[in-house]
Amino acid sequence: MKKISTKQAVLILVAVLAVAGVVWAVTRAPAKAVNPQAGAPKPALTVTTAQPQTTQLPITLSANGNITAWQEAVVGSESNGLRLSEVRVNVGDTVRAGQVLATFAAESVLADVAQTKANLAEAEANAQDAAGNAERARSLQATGALSTQQINQYETAAQTAKARVDAARATLAVQQLRMKHTQVLAPDSGLISARSATVGAVVPSGTELFRLIRQGRLEWRAEVTSSELGRLPVGTAVALTAANGAQVTGKVRMLAPTVDVQTRSALVYVDLPSEAAAAPGRPKQGTAPSGGSEPRTAGSVGASSVKAGMFAKGEFSLGVSGALTVPQQAVVVRDGFSYVFRLNADSRVSQLKVQAGRRLGDRVEVLDGLTPDTVLVVSGAGFLNDGDLVKNVPVSEPNTPQALVKPANAASK
């Protein structure tokens, strides 16, 4: 076998390398033709877009305040030195005008009434006798049997006896009034809010026994600035949220005639639905006399939803106005400012500073910095920066299930 020299081996190696280079160049050329955009930049994020919409938004004015009783009546004792024998109502009970709330022991008053009636009967008998004597004396005046002085004495005695009858009748009226005051009556329909009456206590006249929320009416006293008073006419609707989460509605009844000189705020009195319904599980006590006024029934709010003394915040409804709104997802808050991202024709985004206003559901009002024809990034806006390249995809419509239709034969059955 003929041996290959070193020079021939080198030549063969060079030839093999050249062939390999040609093959590699030929195989790489089609790959460049297939992917001509291999060097193009990739989008930073896939997003969806939307345009601003013109929407009618409510105009509201927010305020804070306390819920209080519309009027609170103090029911006191008009009897002096009598013992409380019965208390018929408790805190939370609903009462009617004229209903008996408590009674005093009336034994001593009954005895005084009986004694006064006897004194009146005696005075009437004496007055009748004195009147008869005076009549007889006047009939003898023409005969001269009695002097003028004697006749005047008989007439004076008759008038004195008549005055004693009037005094006895007045005393009887006083005793009968004391007898009436042994029953403590409700001055108006409403809800018992406080009770200090205790069975067996001997209380002096004027002592407070009960407190009554008249007609069960509550009101919200909102504090507003003096500059806002002119925007709140009487009858304005108000939506309240109490501290316990209860939501009620009311109307402005009146505005305070003065403004506090220290805080420069004024009170707005808002009528709330009546809370005069009896508490659940507690029956109304006693009966109302004929002709007594009925208490107001509770409105759309239950008797336990709002209470006097609660703190509440509310919004006065001042009408509606047009507004340019965007989806809430499109607004990004950074460093205390609101921004949106506009999608440009080159698929890059521009960060725009806007001024946000009112909110309604998932829509946010934009007061400044935006035009209605701007295309805004919605989903993914919080992950973008100014100048990022994005890929815009249409928003997929939710699948609508087909209506369930019964077969004809099943419907006939």
Image (cartoon, grey):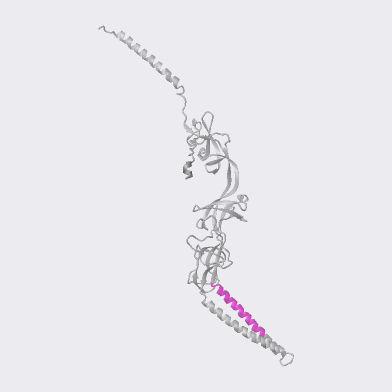
Give the answer, above or below, for where 350 lies relative to 405: above
Residue at horizontal 48%, vertical 44%? 412
* Range covered by the magenta-colored residues: 158-182
- Position of 266 with respect to 397 (left or right) is right
Of residues 248 and 289, the one drawn nearer to the viewer in this rendering: 289
What is the residue that sits farthest to the left in this orientation?
Answer: 1
What is the residue that sits farthest to the bottom in this orientation?
Answer: 145
Residue 176 magenta-drawn? yes
Residue 221 placement (x, y as % from top left) = 56, 55
Residue 298 placement (x, y as % from top left) = 54, 58
Residue 23 placement (x, y as % from top left) = 38, 15
Residue at horizontal 54%, vertical 78%? 110
Of residues 395 and 17, the one drawn nearer to the viewer in this rendering: 395
What is the residue that sits farthest to the top in this orientation?
Answer: 2
Q: Which secondary structure dominates the residues rendered in magenta? A: helix
Give the answer, above or below, for where 311 lies relative to 29: below
- Position of 64 with respect to 128 (left or right) is left
Give the answer, above or below, for where 271 lies relative to 187: above
Residue at horizontal 60%, vertical 50%? 228
Residue 272 magenta-drawn? no
Q: Quadrant of the N terminus?
A: top left
Residue 42 placement (x, y as % from top left) = 46, 28
Q: Is residue 404 visible?
A: no
Of residues 260 and 123, the one drawn nearer to the viewer in this rendering: 123
Residue at horizontal 62%, vertical 80%? 167
Query: In this figure, what is the number of numbered marks?
Result: 0
Q: Is residue 251 visible?
A: yes
